[in-house]
Image (cartoon, helix red, strand yellow):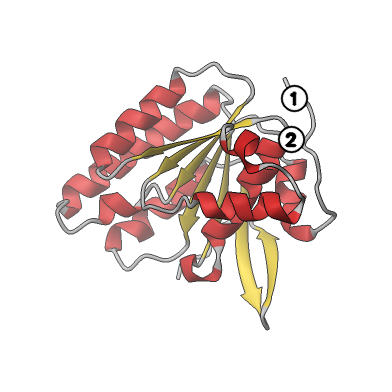
Amino acid sequence: MTTAILNLREEEMDAPIVKWERNGIAMLTGIRDQGVYRLALHWEFVFAVSGFSVFNLDCAICFNPFRITNETRKYSIAPEPILEKIFVQRAFTPYQILDSLHSITKQRNTDMVYFLLAPCKQFFDADVADDEGLFLLKKMVDVLEEIRSLKIPTLVVESISYKHKNFQTIFPKLMETSENFWELQIQNGLSRIKTRKSPLLR
């Protein structure tokens, strides 16, 4: 198993995953329009170039391969070997998401890092009744607790803001599954990562 992540550049934005022990759940959050998913894809590149395989459960069409190839160009790295290490599965209903998460609990690939991109979004869909959505969200949290207990390295990447009322209920529970919690913030046009111990609901 790869024991250390290659730190491509000494920047604050990479510090969280460089230090991450990868023994369970971590969470990255922020405002979608301010680049939280773009940062997640950069982190995927860092993992892939460091020898890890990366699995994306993409729940809101957040994965963009061109983000990865742009990173490879910055460092004059051939894109094909990096892209071959990154796997993408898309899920568009709460039931598909839950099935995929259950599949992760059965994985035993010690060189795989799992990224869950916007896992909550589909539970807030207008076609999902509020009570059903909340029930299924709690099921999702239960599976994440199992993933944590199995110490499967999983990074949940989720927006810090949804208008749906169930978000206020589920977000603190989602955060409780995470050993590490980071928030991307933009202030005066500059990005920074804030490490949080408690959720900031907006």
Residue depicted at x 65% and y 48%: 43
In the depicted view, which residue is nearer to us: 38 or 131? Answer: 38
Q: Is residue 105 above or below residue 167?
A: above
First in residue order: circle 2 vs circle 1: 1
Toward which corner of the image does residue 7 lie, by quadrant?
top right
Q: Amino acid at mark 1?
A: Thr
Taking the image as shown, residue 46 lies to the left or right of residue 88, namely right
Residue depicted at x 78% and y 59%: 12
In the depicted view, which residue is nearer to us: 30 or 85? Answer: 85
**Residue 135 x, y percent position in the rendering:** 24, 42
Q: Is residue 125 above or below residue 177?
A: below
Quarter of the picture containing the C terminus is bottom left
Q: Amino acid at mark 2?
A: Ser
Residue corresponding to mark 1:
2
Residue at disc 2, secondary structure? loop
What mark, if any, has residue 71 been given in the picture? none
Between circles 2 and 1, the one closer to the viewer is 2
Residue 81 can be seen in this image: yes
**Residue 175 x, y percent position in the rendering:** 51, 48
Residue depicted at x 64% and y 57%: 196
> Marks 2 and 1: CB-CB under 8 Å?
yes
* CA neighbours of label 2 inside 10 A, class few (<14), some (14 to 19), many (20+): some
Q: Is residue 84 above or below residue 187?
A: above
Residue corresponding to mark 2:
50
**Residue 70 x, y percent position in the rendering:** 63, 56
**Residue 49 x, y percent position in the rendering:** 71, 38
